[in-house]
Amino acid sequence: MSAAFASVTARLPKGWGDLGRQLGILVGVDVIYELGRGIADSSEADAIAHGAQVIDFERSTHTLFEPDLQKFFLPAHWTIDLANQLYLNAQFSIALGFLVWLYLFRNESYNFVRNMFVVSMCLALIGYVGFPTAPPRLFPHDGFVDTITEFSKVNHDSALVKIFINPYAAVPSMHCAFALMIGATGVMVCRHWWAKALWAAWPLLIVWVVIVTANHYWVDWALGWMVAGASALIAQRLLARVRPESWAWRARPTREVEA
């Protein structure tokens, strides 16, 4: 046991104390974020009205392509099952796994990415509280299909789900925001062309996922990417000035680990 503990300790870039601090920061921010989404005082009537406004905007600009995209993929059930699983699981597992890898093997870039994530979650809460919006899956009369309910049998309206998920938090899409922040970071810190290609494709895959499952409009995707861009700017232009020695962006690898 002592040998195993020593082996793990040797792999930690800054020791157990720093690891504990980072875990505390991430858990604390995520709990506040999820509870904020879940208990935000949003009116169902307002959310439905805002969702209808988004649909009307897309229809008026001839960009309401989401129902047709769904119809194209619906006959291929395996693609819908894949999209459902990615939507339900990738937000947490991929983001957490990437942060763990980044902390262990590209630690010089970790603090900046952590700060970027925190800023993006704060910006998203402003949108969720100020502009509650019903997702497209709640508008079947406009041609949208709730694939997660129909194919995966997950009830969005269950009491347990509603504790942590605001059903009217469509704008912006944080699935898309996180995917872009992770993908862009992966492209910059990975060494091999195939790893860079995979991370470059990840944000586009998640765009497809959120649209084909009818959980977001393309407007949400665009706003999610804007949140990611704004978060990167704030992390670099404002937060990095507070502690430039540790919070500024650095992509110089310090460990010879293949990825």
Image: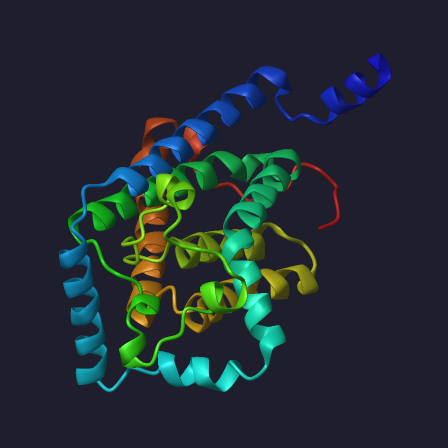
- Would you place residue 33 above or below residue 168 in this image? above
Give 112 or 75, whichever is nearer the viewer. 75
Q: Quadrant of residue 197?
A: bottom right
Q: Residue furthest top?
A: 2
Left or right of 54, for residue 78 = right
Left or right of 257, for residue 85 = left
- Would you place residue 77 above or below residue 258 in this image? below
Left or right of 132, for residue 240 = right
Q: Position of residue 233 (x, y in %)?
A: 32, 48
Give 104 or 69, whichever is nearer the viewer. 69
Q: Position of residue 25 (x, y in %)?
A: 44, 26
Left or right of 63, for residue 82 = right
Q: Position of residue 188 (x, y in %)?
A: 55, 54
Q: Quadrant of residue 187?
A: bottom right
What residue lies at 65% left-to-right and 26% top-to-bottom?
Answer: 13
In this figure, which colouring scheme has been used for the structure?
rainbow
What residue lies at 58% left-to-right and 23% top-to-bottom?
Answer: 19
Badge count: 0
Viewport quadrant of the N terminus: top right
What residue lies at 82% left-to-right and 20% top-to-bottom?
Answer: 4
- Would you place residue 15 above or below residue 161 in this image? above
Q: Position of residue 198 (x, y in %)?
A: 62, 64
What residue lies at 27% left-to-right and 79% top-to-bottom?
Answer: 141
